[in-house]
Amino acid sequence: MSEPQPGSEPQSSGGRLVDVVLDEASIARSTPEVEHDRAVAIYDLIEENAFQPVGQPAANYVLRLSVVEKKLVFQIRTEDDREVVTHVLSLSPLRKIVKDYDLICESYYEAIRHATPSQIEAIDMGRRGVHNEGSAVLMERLAGKIEVDMQTARRLFTLVYALHWKG
């Protein structure tokens, strides 16, 4: 049994997301697999997350994610629609990881159709590794702005990946 990684457990005393909205202007329709991953990530994110804007009281938050001028925008509001904060992050540190993740996802979805179970497992291990790398970079980029655990960062990275289709 492995030790939990620091920051991997949800924070029960902090805030949490109760809704996530992807800006329609920032996202394009994509493959059914990516659409499914996006829907699952949003569902899982709302079900279990640790999301605490730094300097704000613990509350239920709504996150609107968008891409504006090649920048990732986290617009955070309270559940009762009060504006909390907006953070704008450069996508540059994530660009290569998102590109690598896109390539490995294409290989994975193709493997599901034609490869052996051991080949699929090997590709999936690589896919999870790149996904973890992207999640860690996202956590670093959010440091000092929004406190998230690793599971929340993983699900947010899936949504950032979904936004790359048009962003």
Image: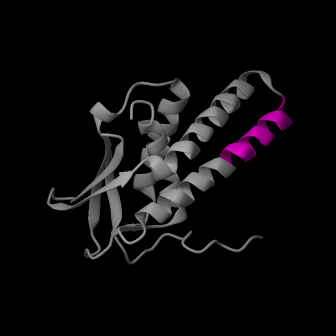
Q: Which residue lies furthest to the top in this view?
A: 114
Q: How is the image coloured?
A: one colour
Quadrant location, the N terminus: bottom right
Horizontal and vertical percent for residue 129? 68, 51
Residue drawn at (28%, 60%) of the image: 61
Task: Between residue 82 and residue 67, name the one nearer to us.
Answer: 67
Q: Residue 166 versus residue 17: which sits nearer the camera?
A: 166
Residue at 35% x, 68% y is 145
In this view of the protein, can residue 157 be seen by the observer?
no
Q: Nearer the viewer, residue 51 or 165?
A: 165
Closer to us: 40 or 139: 139
Residue 120 part of the magenta-drawn span: yes
Q: Residue 45: where, in percent of width, then height?
A: 44, 53
- Where residue 72 appears, as percent x and y from the top left, is 36, 48
Res. 50 visible in picture: yes
User: Which image quarter holds the C terminus?
Assistant: top left
Image height of 43 relative to 142, above or below: above
30 sits to left or right of 134: left
Instruction: Report the span colored magenta.
Output: 116-128
Who's the residue at 48% across and 63% down the image? 139
Q: Which residue lies furthest to the front in this view?
A: 92
On screen, residue 102 versus residue 158, left or right, reads: right
Q: What secondary structure do most residues of the magenta stretch adopt?
A: helix
Looking at the image, residue 82 sits to the left or right of residue 130; the answer is: left
Q: Where is residue 83 in the image (x, y as percent from the top left)?
A: 16, 59
Q: In this view, does 8 lie to the left or right of 2?
A: left
Q: Does the magenta stretch include residue 41?
A: no
> What number of labels is visible?
0
Could you tell me which residue is drawn at 46 percent across and 59 percent down? 48
Specify the quadrant of the image occupied by residue 2.
bottom right
